[in-house]
Structures are given as C-alpha cells and as structure tokens.
Amino acid sequence: MVIKGIIFDLDGVLVFTDKFHYLAWKKVADKLGIYFDEKINNRLRGVSRMASLEIILENYHGEVLSAQQKEEIAAEKNEYYRSFLAKMRPEDVDIETRSTLAELRRRGYKLALGSSSKNAKFILSQVGLTSAFDAISDGNNITHSKPNPEVFLKAAEFLNLCPGQCAVVEDAYAGIDAAKEGGMLAVAIGDATSYEKDDIKLKKFSDLLKHFK
C-alpha cells in the first residue's frame, strides 16, 4: 500500500523536552523521598503520565497511596512540567525540522502528530509548529498509551487514511512497537535506530526526504 500520511511522535523527534520531564519528576520524587535518576527517567519515554508515576513509585517505601493521591501527584508533576514548557520558543525547533516538514507537505503527504502527551498542543503552540500538521492525536483523545497503537490509529483516522497508508516516525522502542502493532511503517530516529523491529532508520530528520519522494 502506498504511504500517503506520516505521523510524528513529538518528544525526541520534533522537540526535546526530556530534560523538563526529568526535572519535574525529580521534584516530585525528592518531595516523596524517592530515589530517581536519569536511568529511571529513560524508562518513562513514550509512557503515559500515570504509568510513569507507577514506575517511579517502585522505589517508594512510604504509606500506601490512594488512586486520588496518585492523581494529585501526577497533576503536581504536570504543573512543574508546564512551567518549564512555558519557556519554550520557536527557536527550540531547528530549521532542518521545519523545512523537512514543509517539503513533505509540498510533496503531498498528510502530516499528523501522534503523541501520548496531554501537553502536545501546548508545546506545538509554544514552538510555532501547530500549522505544520493536518491532524493532532494526543493524550487527550486516547485511553491507552504506547506500545498500544491507539494514538497512531486515531491519527490515521483523523487524516482519513488507513493504517497501512501511514508511516510513523519514532525515537522510542515503545513507539516502534505501537507503529508495528497498528500495521504502519515504522521509521526510527535517535535511540530507536538500535531496535531491530523498525522498517527504516534515519541518521538525521531530513533523511525522511530520501525515503518519501
């Protein structure tokens, strides 16, 4: 089937906010007396906020937390995170990324965002990338995070395309798994290029133009 749409993960592909996630989760962990480092933070990539919290709580030895308390902790983390995101500006997205997205659209591809983040639209607005996409599927319209393919399947639906007509650009193993599970072409960049399940490996973002003529 011919590829007509390209779905992009956000974090680690278009923008890099890992440091903000780390700093926000670190503030929460320190407050709870939980050991947290960058190695643990790497396990949170592509994972939903609540699932991330459960991973962090593996090192928690305090009283049992209720579901409501966990929701409050996750909300507190998000407030810290959004305070960091509010400092993002258009210059946080490089020219190569912007020009590549523009050229792909010029070539006739439909472009969508497929991110588990509930802050995706806010981030796109901060860096001036909202208009680069024909559709946005994010944490606000899904119930399952990656490696479940729901966020990508919704993106394909929003583009009015079949899953098999879509390619997914991802930097995380969970994202590659989600793309494959959804029946889509899996394009790896960054850390995901070491994963054997991907279909295409990119050395840099602009290499997309070599594969999607």
Image: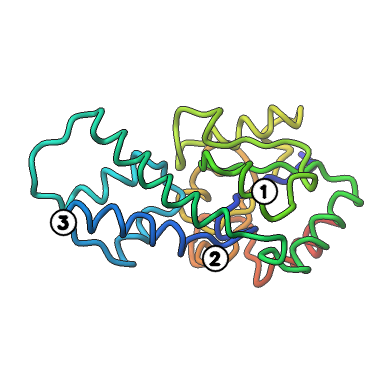
Residues at marks 3 and 2, CA–CA distance in whole angstroms: 35 Å
Vertical placement of residue 81 versus 182, above or below: below
Along the viewing direction, whichever of 208 and 117 lies nearer the viewer: 117
Question: Which disc is residue 193 wearing?
Answer: 2
Amino acid on which the number 3 mark rests in the picture: Gly
In the rendered image, which residue does mark 3 sit on?
33
Q: Residue at x 76, y 39 (%)?
A: 1
Identify the element where label 2 is drawn: helix
| CB atoms of marks 1 and 3 within 8 Å | no
Residue 36 location (% of width, % of height): 25, 62
Q: Earlier in the sequence, mark 3 or mark 2?
A: 3
Image: 139 above or below 92: above
Of 188 and 28, which appears nearest the observer? 28
For residue 154, what is the image quadrant? top right
Q: In x, y percent, where is residue 75?
A: 37, 39
**Residue topped by disc 1:** 124
Instruction: Measure the C-alpha gap from mark 1 to mark 3.
Output: 33 Å
Residue in the picture at 41% in, 51% down: 80
